[in-house]
Image (cartoon, helix red, strand yellow):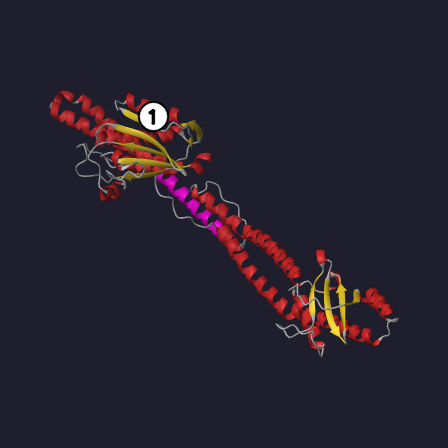
Amino acid sequence: MTPPSKRTWSLFSSTALALVGSISVILIFALSAVTWFVMVPMAKRSADDLAALIVLSAQTWIELPKASQPLLAAELKNQHGLTVEEIPELNRQHSTNLPYVRFLHDAVVRRFNQCPPNTLDPQTDECIYMGSLAHGAGYWIEIPIAGDVLKFEFSPNRVGYKIPLTLGVILVGGILLTLSAGLLLARRLTRPVSRLAEQVSRGLPDAPLPLTGPRETRVLIEAVNRRSAEVNRLVENRTVLLAGISHDLRTPLTRLSLSLALAQDALEAELHDQMQADIQQMNQLIGEVLSIARGVNQAPLESVDAHAWLSHCVASAARRGITVELIEPATPAQFMLAPPTAQRILDNLIDNAQRYGRPPIHLRRLETPDAHILCIEDHGAGLTSDEIITLRAPFARKDAARSGVTGYGLGLSLAEALAEAQGWQLDLYAPGAHPYLAAAEQPCGLTACLSLPKAAAKR
């Protein structure tokens, strides 16, 4: 099998990726700036205010008589959401690293001027300890002051700024909104071009495409419509011209053939036969030119069973005296094609294999992930790669054909024109260059392969 082609990005994918990527970078930069210059300073200011309240409450607590301390505790609980109590000793452990809590701890340390003896942490040289309550109930902070240890507790609602949660919500929400907006914008920008590319990939459209999308896209669609109309006019003019010339040539050839038949007794038999052969060759050439003139017209497509249709083509070749062996996999397949036109392509290639090659002639059906493949293989002398390139042009002929038979050089051009009209691709391969067979199975002659994309087959 042929190696898979390099994957390319569609216009929608590349545009959407560029939009989402660029907007995401801008969003992250803006979020970082807001965090650094707005949220962090506001969180520090809020933590500093709460630290001032805690230190002031601690200083007030030790100055009040024991009987008044419960009143202060109730006031802090009701008005500020703080719970204060005296504890026997410091826990001497930190159990939280949340940004706001760290800001609060540092603010309390700055406001707390002096640590009592035997309260310093040997690692941090600080005597303020802070941690989290069990089950996420809140936070605590312990302050040693005037021989006592005060423990303040407050719920998470008392924390004014939840920086990680806020950043996460903004980042996730911003990315989702950015992704949605980028996809919608990319779809709006690329849909007209994608439709145009799909239409053009199937051939120039017969009817003008609708003008949709931005101004540049409308200009492109209008140019394609204009060129399509010009090509259609050129094809029609060429068809009319070739058909007219061929028809006009048939009339004098008929008169020549009739005159030759009337003068048969007056001519030598050898001369008569030679002139009759020349007239037949001219008629054959005119017929091939007419086939090219009519061949590019697209016929209605039908869904056909691959095995049944190929068997019919093999039987048709047998009626012409050509033996063709059909080789195909066991898996069934459906082709979407115009049977008369597609059979003309295969008949032409089979006739060429019989005329210029040698039997046995094989008609092989293969499948790739993307296409159905039909190959006509013979066991003649074959052609070189350079000869294949030359013989694809109309009226090009090899000086000494593979079997010594001469032609007019239109058969391959006709087959290629018909294949393109059907959405097929015709490729010729020199001996030993068959891309779908192993080296031991290579035919020694020319191989002509028709490729029908499966996407086109589905249409």
Left or right: 122, with 303 as reference point:
right
Q: Nearer the viewer, residue 304 or 32?
A: 32
Report whether 136 appears left or right of 248.
right
Instruction: Decide if residue 88 is on the left or right side of residue 316.
Output: right
Residue 222 percent location from the top left of the image: 48, 50
Residue at the (25%, 37%) spot, across then down:
409
Vertical comparison of 87 with 395: above or below? below
Residue 340 seen anywhere in this rendered image of the structure: yes
In percent of width and height, residue 241 lies at: 34, 38
Looking at this view, name the residue that lies furthest to the bottom: 113
Residue beneath disc 1: 313
Magenta includes 318? no
- Picture layout, residue 394 above or below residue 252: below
Give residue 354's quadrant in the image: top left
Left of 34 or right of it: where is 11? left
What residue do we see at 74% from left, 73% from top?
Answer: 144
Tell me, yes or no, if residue 248 can be seen here. no
Q: Which residues are magenta?
A: 218-238
In front of the other: 290 or 159: 159
- Give the dominant element type of the magenta stretch: helix, strand or loop: helix
Where residue 113 sits: x, y (%)? Answer: 71, 79
Q: Position of residue 132 (x, y in %)?
A: 70, 62
Where is the N terminus found, in terms of image quarters? top left
Q: Residue furthest right?
A: 67
Q: Amino acid at mark 1?
A: Cys
Q: Which residue shows up at 41% across the image and 38% down it? A: 369
Q: Is residue 179 above or below residue 140?
A: above
Tell me the element at label 1: helix
Total residue callouts: 1
| Badge 1 density bin: few <14, some 14–19, many ≥20, Cα 10 Å | many
Relative depth, front residue between 280 and 365 = 365
